[in-house]
Amino acid sequence: MAFTLSIGSAAPNFSLRATDGKTYSLKDFADAKILVVFFTCNHCPYVLGSDEVTRQTAKKFEPKGVKFVGINSNSPNTYEEDSFENMVKRIKEHKFPWTYLYDDTQDIARAYGALRTPHFFVFNEKRKLVYTGRGVDNPREISRMTVNDLDNALTEITAGKKVTTAMTNPIGCNVKWDGKDQHWMPPDACDLV
């Protein structure tokens, strides 16, 4: 079996603490027509570089029933900036339009097969995976961005169409696995395309 969820896979459930103090699971987003689960963090330059484009995409598709859920699975033992306390500070400061969850056991990152930050997973109404990969082609330098794959996928799915490019390679820092070197990736993790 591939490390990362394959297209058509069901969304793995989760029960994770959010920056608002509540605990959320998949069913808490049942009212979303489309659910975007993405793995993110507080320190990665690829996340920091593209957060505002992610915000614009989330706001653009919110009226069409699309909800965004960010999950931080990075170990604070690798980067202290990725601690839960810093997540709370970051969401308060930036007022991002998504629920921000903390995967302190990293079990959810393993369940989804998160490779990098950011890494996006788009699920349809039946919570089947219809897109996975990068948000944009140059997340670190948005001024050099030429394609927004996430926007393209959401445009197609909200119009009732099949996603033309259902899989891309995420671009960013690797997930920071607890107890491992900061550049370590699981042996079965590999490029998606």
Image (spheres, helix red, strand yellow):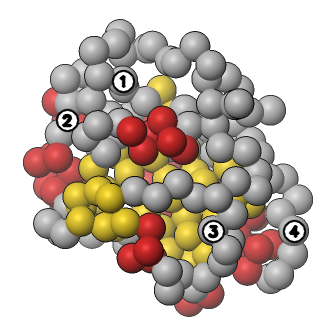
Q: CA distance from mark 3 to mark 2?
A: 32 Å
Q: How many marks?
A: 4
Q: For this rendering, which residue is in front, 180 or 79?
A: 180
Q: Amino acid at mark 1?
A: Trp
Q: Which mark is residue 177?
A: 1
What SS does tag 2 mark? helix
Residue at 82% from the left image edge and 81% from the top image edge? 160
Instruction: Name the disc covering residue 162, or none.
Output: 4
- Whichever of callouts 3 and 4 sits on the residue coming sooner in the sequence is 3
Residue 131 visible in the snapshot: no
Q: Label 4 to label 1, Cα distance in Å?
A: 34 Å
Kindly identify which residue carries mark 3: 127
Can you say which quadrant of the picture contains the N terminus?
A: top right
Q: Earlier in the sequence, mark 3 or mark 1?
A: 3
Q: Secondary structure at mark 3?
A: loop
Q: Using the image as rendered, state which of residue 49 and residue 126 is in the foreground.
A: 126
Residue 156, compared with residue 111, is above or below; it is: below
Q: Residues within 10 Å of mark 2 (few under 14, many from 20)?
A: some
